[in-house]
Amino acid sequence: MRANDSGQLRILALGAHPDDIEAGCGGTLIKYARGGHRIFLMVLTAGEQGAGRGVRMREQEQAAKSLKAEKIFWGGYPDTKLPIEQRLIQKIERVVREVEPHFIFVHFHDDTHQDHRHLAVSTVTATRYTKNVMFYEGPTTQNFSPTVFVNIDAVLEDKVDALRAHQSQVKKTNIEGLTIVDIIRASAHFRGIQGRVKNAEGFVPLRLFINIGQ
């Protein structure tokens, strides 16, 4: 799949809950948007276990503005009950057909939250014909060893602002004295060290094409 004549790419990021995308690949999406590329989000639940459904959805809509996302596709599944089923795969496939993304970002499959695991596994099937599919990490990800890095030093504060749009979740880390902002800053520093820059987001590719010439 090619970019349009202006070189504009379509980027689709999937998350099980509001704030997952911002935490996992928000900096990368902001950089894409600033480069003139088109951003789309698919959020499979409203995250109502963390706060009211309306609250979480409004927070996600506000955060999407920080990412310059054109559209949020809502999955409509209940929080904590995202299943591995044909219907979920088909929902993702429909969004993929509509957006025709050049890059897809989604949770890594080794994660302590069942919704994250199930979305990752379902996305692998639903994106089997997409060339570039990247797994991102979050606070509940396990055994994540990124081999692809994006320097987000110039946009780290913008990523933090997008996360702060999820006001109901900032302090819900289950780690005393640490907010989600603290965790994301620490992760950015650590992945930056691995990638030999100050701050970075790391990714594990399912597939990554490097285009050389035509």
Image (cartoon, rainbow, N blue to C red):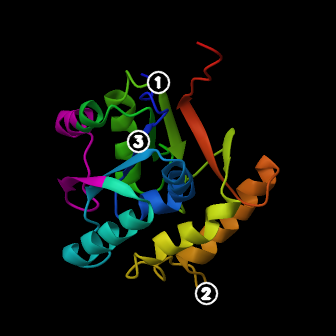
Task: Locate the C terminus by quadrant.
Answer: top right
Q: Amino acid at mark 1?
A: Lys
User: Residue 33's x, y, as percent?
Assistant: 48, 52
Above or below, 125 against 31 in this view is above
User: Residue 191's x, y, as percent?
Assistant: 72, 54
Q: Which numbered disc flags the more N-terminal residue, 3 or 1?
A: 3
Q: Which numbered disc flags the more N-terminal residue, 1 or 2?
A: 1
Question: In terms of image quadrants, where is residue 118?
Answer: top left
- Give the residues in magenta: 71-94
Query: Is residue 172 in view?
Result: yes
Above or below, 64 against 42 in this view is below
Tell me the tag on residue 131: 1
Question: In terms of image quadrants, where is residue 57?
Answer: bottom left
How would you rate the neighbour count of disc 1 (Cα within 10 Å): few for under 14, some for 14-19, many for 20 or more?
Answer: some
Q: Nearer the viewer, residue 191 or 151?
A: 151
Q: Is residue 202 left or right of residue 106?
A: right
Tell me the tag on residue 177: 2
Residue lying furthest front = 6
Q: Work out how far the residue at label 3 is from the one at label 1, CA to CA, in angstroms.
A: 16 Å
Query: Residue at the location (33% across, 74% down)?
Result: 59
User: Residue 109's x, y, as percent?
Assistant: 47, 43
Q: Which numbered disc flags the more N-terminal residue, 3 or 2?
A: 3
Q: Foreground mark, 1 or 2?
A: 1
Q: Secondary structure at mark 3?
A: helix
Q: Work out how far the residue at label 1 is from the one at label 2, CA to CA, in angstroms.
A: 41 Å
Tell me the tag on residue 120: 3
Q: Amino acid at mark 3?
A: Ala
